[in-house]
Image (cartoon, rainbow, N blue to C red):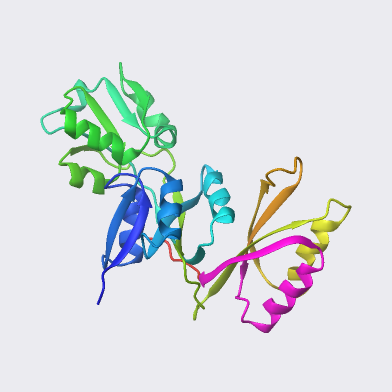
Amino acid sequence: MAILSVGYQGERGAYSEQAARLFFRGKARLVPYAQFSEVFRHASKGGAHFSVIPIENSLFGSVHENYDHLIRSKLSIVGEIKLKIQHQLMASRGTTLKEIRTVYSHPQALGQCQEFLRSLKRVETRAFYDTAGAAKMLARENLRDAAAIASEQAAKTYGLKILKRNIEDNHHNFTRFLVLSTRPIKPKLHPKTSLVFSVRDVPGALFKALAVFALRDINLHKIESRPLVGRPWEYLFYLDISGCPGDPIVRQAVSHLREFCTFLRILGSYEAGKTR
């Protein structure tokens, strides 16, 4: 049996890698890419069987770049997983907390640990492109007066010592990841469907579009608007709903929705993800 390959953005030890490991239960070869655009490009060309991307964080909101990549690609959403984000302060072995003068991490991680960072004396923060990338740099250069904020897996991957655990200001910090593939699936249990559409710029158009789900008691989990490129002040609307197009009631709703749309695309159906 061929080993599945799964692409993700970030260095080894990134939270996306952790989400991929949990979703595929360690039964896949994980392939890191530097940029989200590379993840989508390689997946679309068959460079990976699946891809795992973050789509929203419970504190900082949506990853807008990935919504834009979704509409431009032909990949289908085939799964999701929600990961609790726990930030660890790590440093080279032998370095103590009192010796730390600089802390590196992704801007979001630094922002999510502001209260802890303020408690440190004479310490400055420096933004880095990736949490795991900051840990990798720290280990490679063997900095003795610096630390990184990243995952526990990053500390293990790069041989760093965790100085302080779970330093995030809000412990209810979760990121939702999507699993993408070139082949759509039909979920068996707890199905969800993601779709994107645009409507005419006339009074009541969006209300009528959303009403097709309310009239049929279809639960709407999320709505996200993004600018429609090339058409200023017009928008695409991304929806997550319960059910899948194979269900008669969902099929009727989508058919009804088409009456109000200038554009409509099903992004994928998948089983509602668990929180890990």
x and y percentages locating residue 55 in the rendered image: 50, 52
Q: Is residue 273 left or right of residue 91?
A: right
Is 210 rendered above or below residue 191?
Answer: above
Is 217 rendered above or below residue 171?
Answer: below
x and y percentages locating residue 260 in the rendered image: 81, 64
Q: Is residue 136 left or right of residue 169?
A: left
Is 16 rendered above or below residue 4?
Answer: above
| Residue located farthest toward the bottom when viewing the structure as drawn | 248
x and y percentages locating residue 80 in the rendered image: 46, 63
Does the stretch in magenta take in 252? yes
Residue 62 in view: no
Is 8 rendered above or below residue 77?
Answer: above
Residue 180 in view: yes
Instruction: Write down the quadrant of residue 192 in the picture.
Output: bottom right
Q: What's the residue at 44%, 42% (across, down)?
A: 170
27 vs 69, nearest the viewer: 69
x and y percentages locating residue 110 in the rendered image: 40, 32
| Residue located farthest toward the front when viewing the structure as drawn | 45
Q: What's the residue at 51%, 71% (across, down)?
A: 270
161 vs 171, nearest the viewer: 161
Question: Which image quarter holds the N terminus?
Answer: bottom left
Question: Which image quarter holds the C terminus?
Answer: bottom left
45 vs 115, nearest the viewer: 45
Instruction: Write down the quadrant of residue 264 in the picture.
Output: bottom right
Q: Is residue 197 left or right of residue 84?
A: right
Q: What's the residue at 84%, 50% (across, down)?
A: 201
| Residue located farthest toward the left when viewing the structure as drawn | 94
Does the stretch in magenta take in 36? no
75 vs 248, nearest the viewer: 75
Please give the range of residues in magenta.
241-270
